[in-house]
Amino acid sequence: MTGNSTAWKMVEIGNLIFREIELPGFSGQQKENNKAMRRIKLTVAYDGTAYKGWQLQPNGVTIEEMLNKALSDLLKEPVCVIGASRTDSGVHARGNVAVFDTESRIPGDKFCYAVNRGLPEDIRVVESEEVPTDWHPRKQNCVKTYEYQILNCKIEIPTRRLYAHFCYYPLNVEKMNEAAKYLIGEHDFISFCAANHQAEETVRTIYGAEVKKNDEDIVTIRLCGSGFLYNMVRILTGTLLEIGSGMRKPEEMKVILEAKNRDMAGRTAPPEGLFLLHVAYEGERKTV
């Protein structure tokens, strides 16, 4: 290569073939540095209605699959994202976090604009940035915040059906809040974990637990914690619903925690009312 001419060579990775540019005037070391892998962090929002959750599944389309495809198509290289929270089928998110590695030179904060062009309208990357190559979304100190929304009125509102669980009987929010206070702190939450879980450790810390009702008949349960077990938020919600309806007393929450027995807790609430609001990492300025 001489002068200012630009040379291309074809590179094959797996079943993908793309052109790699040889930049003029670069030494061998500079070329090697130019190809260094980078790690990009994505903040992802999605409507989970049409998907079988976050994680790749053999029996349906998932959020992870759609992100992998959009990024691979954009970058012309195989991409596999790693998510902070593997939400269940039908669960929504406003701020899940994922990372992927790439050789692309696209500025970190521009990936969100580029990849959104290849995503369906119910998935959006709302923010992107470059992070250290050893940064892992599930191995950092963080606070995850979930909300569960309940439509509490006599007749269901059709436009709410995909984003709130309908409950026609009156809920006592004061008693639900009284019960929620027992959750705050470090506890073994195995009573609120699905029986088929694979967690080696079931102790988690809850930093905040609150129940509110607005003037549109929406009861919102908000939980902030260091992490959550499989179906934990939905089982806690099912238990709080039983307390709010008068089927249980608020102090039973403490008894259920201490029992360490899934059969003592309430049912698992449906997925459509659940939202992962955000994942706040240590050092970030996030409102919890």
Image: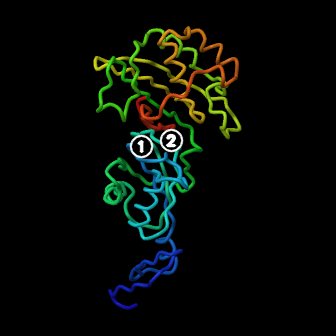
Q: Are marks 2 and 1 in contact (CB under 8 Å)?
A: yes
Q: Is residue 204 left or right of residue 215?
A: right
Up/down of 96 relative to 201, above or below? below
Is residue 23 shown above or below 169? below
Residue 45 image-quadrant placement: top left
> What is the secondary structure assignment of the residue under circle 2?
loop
Considering every residue shown, the one lying at the far front of the view is 155
Residue depicted at 50% across the width and 79% down the height: 12
Residue visible at 53% across and 46% down in the picture = 137
Q: Label 2, on which residue? A: 87
Q: Looking at the image, tell me whether mark 2 or mark 1 is earlier in sequence order.
A: 1
For residue 48, the mark is: 1
Secondary structure type for disc 1: helix
- Amino acid type of the residue that numbered disc 1 sits on in the rendered structure: Gly
Identify which residue, 247 or 131, lies in the foreground: 247
Mark 2–mark 1 distance (CA, rounded to whole Å):
9 Å
Q: Position of residue 187 (x, y in %)?
A: 65, 23
Q: Residues within 10 Å of mark 1 (few under 14, many from 20)?
A: many
Q: Residues within 10 Å of mark 2 (few under 14, many from 20)?
A: many
What is the three-letter code of the residue carrying label 2? Thr
Left or right placement of residue 48 versus residue 178 in this view: left
Point out the image quarter for the N terminus.
bottom left
